[in-house]
Amino acid sequence: MYLQNFLYIFMNHKISQILSGHLSEELNAVAHKVFAKQRISVEEGLILFEKADLGLLGILSGFVCQSKNGDEVYFNRNFHIEPSNVCIYTCKFCSYRHKQDNECWEYDKVYILAKIDEILAGCKTNPATEVHIVGSAHPDKDVYFYGDILKSIKEQHPDLHIKAFSAVEIDYMIEKAEISLEDGIKYLISCGLDSVPGGGAEIFDSEIRKQICPEKADAQRWLQIHQILHENGIKTNATILYGHIENYRHRLEHMEMLRSLQDQTHGFNAFIPLKFRNKNNEMSNISEVSIIEDLKNYAVSRIFLDNIQHLKAYWPAIGKQNAQLALNFGVDDLDGTIQDSTKIYTMAGSEEHAPSMSLADMIELIRSTRKIPVERDSMYNKINTFD
Ligand code: V47
Ligand code: SF4
């Protein structure tokens, strides 16, 4: 709370500085563009990353966030199913695949259905509305294996929204079945796929990709898959994995590619910056970036991505308190209650060891930042506003 109050005072000071013209000419020009709701370029994004201090970024991103979503902060009641961590690829940052033999898991349909029943039975008073299914590109499992799982989940829980499979998983499972991307995606939709999470994007730059995840779907393929999904009426998210060997320009160029696709399709619901965590992976020699860098990154993302409605802080990855701070830097979405159902960030070194929040905890977490908690469904329709 102390830090938050400090930030408010600091921001007010900055507002008066802007008004009295104390910023450098280039920062002033970008700030004016933001206040005029004009789109900023990669070069202007670089000026923000390199020259703006946290106070100014808080004001500018707060202005954009306020114009888009007011004081409302969204969350949903969700849980994760992670079908397997056995993967054909060897992404260097991945803590999933860096495992002892006894840490491998592969769930079949029966196990997954039983797990969903168990989780839903445990939250009967506030039932989860979404299952988020994401795992790996399993060498032996094709689109028909996963389609069958989707069908069975829908048969048993027709009202449960299924957000499933990163573009990388979709790419591999369809290639494995030797059918076209369009046919594979249409098949998954016919089985019950409702929306698609944003994973696998990492950093689109081909040189960086070559170093950290050389084998999997490249930028063009990732974007093509999301484009086909959007054209078939499926909303998706987009992520960026930041804070490793990339630079600010790589981040902005990544966002520019997303911004152009969004101009065409309007299919992205939310952008989710994912901070690189360095435990138990082949990039453990790289230090994690500071919270200051995280907040800067949220802020510039909010300012740059003028056509994506929501900016999400995934609290199991950065921790609850940092997620609260992020609400002052453009973030308006805190993902969901999770119900202790995801392992990847615990394996990668997050502070959150068994990530779970009750509805009451989530509401309190948001309220204590002076924002308005809004429970949403997976399509951002409001279910409950906790004024
Ligand atoms: O693509 C893997 C990331 C992603 C590490 O759409 C790592 O609502 C940090 O996409 N440090 C998968 N990140 C998770 C994901 C996601 C998460 C929450 C919500 C949504 C959504 C999507 O996890 C991967 C990769 O970028 N990741 N290892 C690591 N060591
Ligand atoms: Fe496989 Fe995803 Fe890990 Fe890469 S990040 S190795 S695709 S599970």
Image: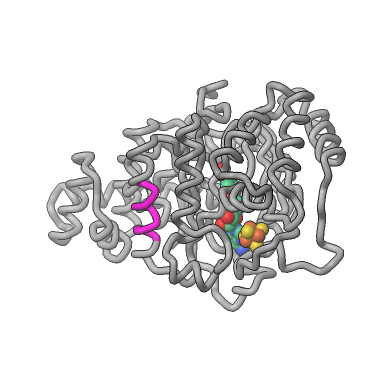
Q: Please say if 257 is above or below 144.
A: below
**Image-based side of 22 in relation to 292, left or right:** left
What span is in magenta?
A: 251-259
Res. 125 in view: yes
Q: Quadrant of the rendered structure where residue 336 is?
A: top right
**Residue 273 colored in magenta in the image:** no
Task: State how many labels appear.
Answer: 0
* Rendered residue at 57%/61% (across/down): 216
Nearer the observer, 29 or 79: 79
* Rendered residue at 35%/33% (across/down): 68
* Rendered residue at 54%/73% (across/down): 287
**Image-based side of 345 in relation to 52, left or right:** right
**Quarter for ligand 2?**
bottom right
Q: Quadrant of the rendered structure where residue 137 is?
A: bottom right
Percent position (x, y) of residue 149?
76, 36
Q: Please say if 157 is above or below 52.
A: above
Percent position (x, y) of residue 345?
66, 56
Res. 363 in view: no
Percent position (x, y) of residue 325?
48, 49
**Residue 255 colored in magenta in the image:** yes
